[in-house]
Image (cartoon, rainbow, N blue to C red):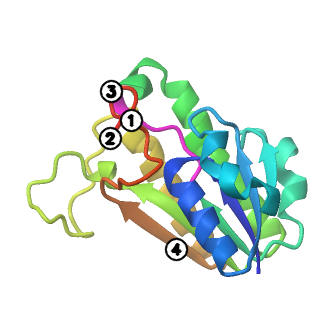
Amino acid sequence: MKCLVTGGCGFLGSHLVETLLSKNHKVTVIDDLSTGNLDNINIFKNKIKFVKADIASSNKIKKYFKNVDWVFHLAARADIVPSIENPKKYFEANVVGTFNILQECRNKKIKKFIYIASSSSYGIPKQYPTSEKSLIDCKYPYALTKYLGEELVMHWGKIYNLPVISLRCFNIYGTRSRTSGTYGA
């Protein structure tokens, strides 16, 4: 299969790319390197196609969807405090960027679209473990933009018959996770 991974230089994205390669898939990574790191893909960079591009700019990414089977959309701005300080940047990346990716998937009739959503859409849950049916209570721009992205994904699945999956992840950690900044592991 030919796979496209947005955010493939990030912690989770780089592990996904590595796994896809181990299963002999062809992989293209789109990442603007705003939070991702080329060091994360160094060990397999000669086995992938890497594109440095901002997903909020649809003209810069369109051509990379040709003949792609699966799209894994992990690219996003993350962290709470920066989202409060600059909500526009988060909206552009997490909502406009997701819209652009979905449009290209729709236009190119992608076989599968997987979106990495965020458990932050629950705010501070009243119950742990938190059920998928828990109340959505976005407290910060980051959470809201990730939830809006998820809503776009599910809507495109329903209206345009795009085969989509959305995964709300909870506190993922491991090798290559970010260790710097306020929210580093």
Q: Is residue 34 above or below residue 4?
A: above
Q: Is residue 144 left or right of residue 171?
A: right
Q: Which residue, given by chain and number where applicable, does mark 4 sit on? A: 165
Q: Amino acid at mark 2?
A: Ala
Q: Position of residue 169 (x, y in %)?
A: 37, 60
Spatial separation of the CA atoms under disc 3 and disc 2 = 9 Å
The local crowd at label 3, few if under 14, some if 14 to 19, many if 20 or more residues have their Cα within 10 Å, is few
Cβ–Cβ below 8 Å for labels 3 and 4?
Answer: no
Q: Is residue 185 left or right of residue 6?
A: left
Q: Amino acid at mark 4?
A: Ile
Q: Where residue 30 is drawn, which disc sits there?
A: none
Using the numbered discs, state the Cα–Cα distance from disc 1 to disc 3 in whole angstroms: 9 Å
Residue at which label 2 appears: 185
Q: What is the C-alpha distance between the residues marked 2 and 1? A: 5 Å
Between disc 2 and disc 1, whose residue precedes? 1
**Residue 179: which disc?**
1
